[in-house]
């Protein structure tokens, strides 16, 4: 069995959402507090980071290229070639202290994600689904992490 080893001392404050992206054979993850998206290629050792305009909880591969990223304000399309984030869906503008936390894509291609109080005190979080270009409330609300 292989021994674990540190391949990148990225200095993450709150690392989140590691995901293997087969199309470029690399590991992607975010650092929420430092507002960064990171990519590591184990074959070459290449490391790359992008600055996000807000706290970013996840970056997941999108059909057709690019990524869907969960920023504090909502879902964004992330174009890694240009380093650009474009808002797709604003989330919870009435809760400015909330942020998107983490997300996952199910086998049917739907994105499931949650929000939470950034101060980790209030039960103001909720659970959502994004499919066919629309955000759907699941009814799970009053969540705290």
Image: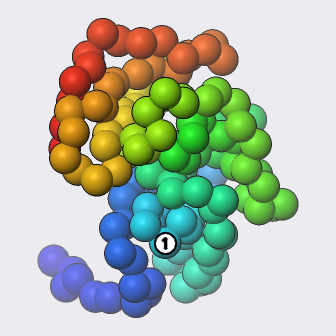
Question: Splitting the image into 4 quarters, where does residue 33 fall?
Answer: bottom left
> Which quarter of the figure is the C terminus placed in?
top left
Drawn side of residue 55 relative to residue 104, left or right: right
> What coloring was used for the rendering?
rainbow
> How far across and how far down the image is residue 100, in percent?
43, 41
Q: Is residue 92 above or below residue 136?
A: below
**Circle 1 SS class:** loop
Drawn side of residue 14 relative to residue 60, left or right: left
Q: Nearer the viewer, residue 52 or 122?
A: 122
> How far across and how far down the image is residue 11, in percent?
40, 85
> How far across and how far down the image is residue 42, in percent?
50, 77
> How far across and how far down the image is residue 132, in percent?
63, 13
From this viewpoint, which residue is outermost toward the left?
A: 1
Q: Is residue 79 visible?
A: yes
The residue singled out by tag 1 in the image is 34
- The residue located at (41%, 12%) in the rendering is 137
- The residue located at (55%, 85%) in the rendering is 45
- The residue located at (20%, 33%) in the rendering is 123
């Amino acid at each position: 069995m292989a021994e674990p080893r540190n391949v990148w001392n990225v200095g993450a404050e709150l690392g989140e959402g590691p995901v293997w992206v087969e199309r470029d054979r690399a590991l992607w993850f975010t650092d929420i507090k430092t507002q960064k998206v990171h990519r590591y290629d184990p074959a070459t050792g290449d490391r790359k980071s992008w600055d996000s305009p807000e706290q970013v909880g996840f970056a997941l591969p999108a059909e057709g290229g690019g990524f869907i990223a969960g920023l504090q304000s909502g879902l964004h399309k992330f174009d890694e070639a240009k380093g650009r984030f474009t808002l797709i869906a604003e989330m919870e503008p009435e809760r400015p202290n909330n942020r998107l936390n983490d997300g996952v894509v199910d086998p049917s291609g739907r994105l499931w994600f949650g929000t939470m109080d950034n101060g980790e005190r209030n039960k103001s979080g909720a659970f959502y689904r994004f499919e066919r270009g629309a955000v759907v409330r699941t009814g799970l609300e009053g969540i705290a992490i």
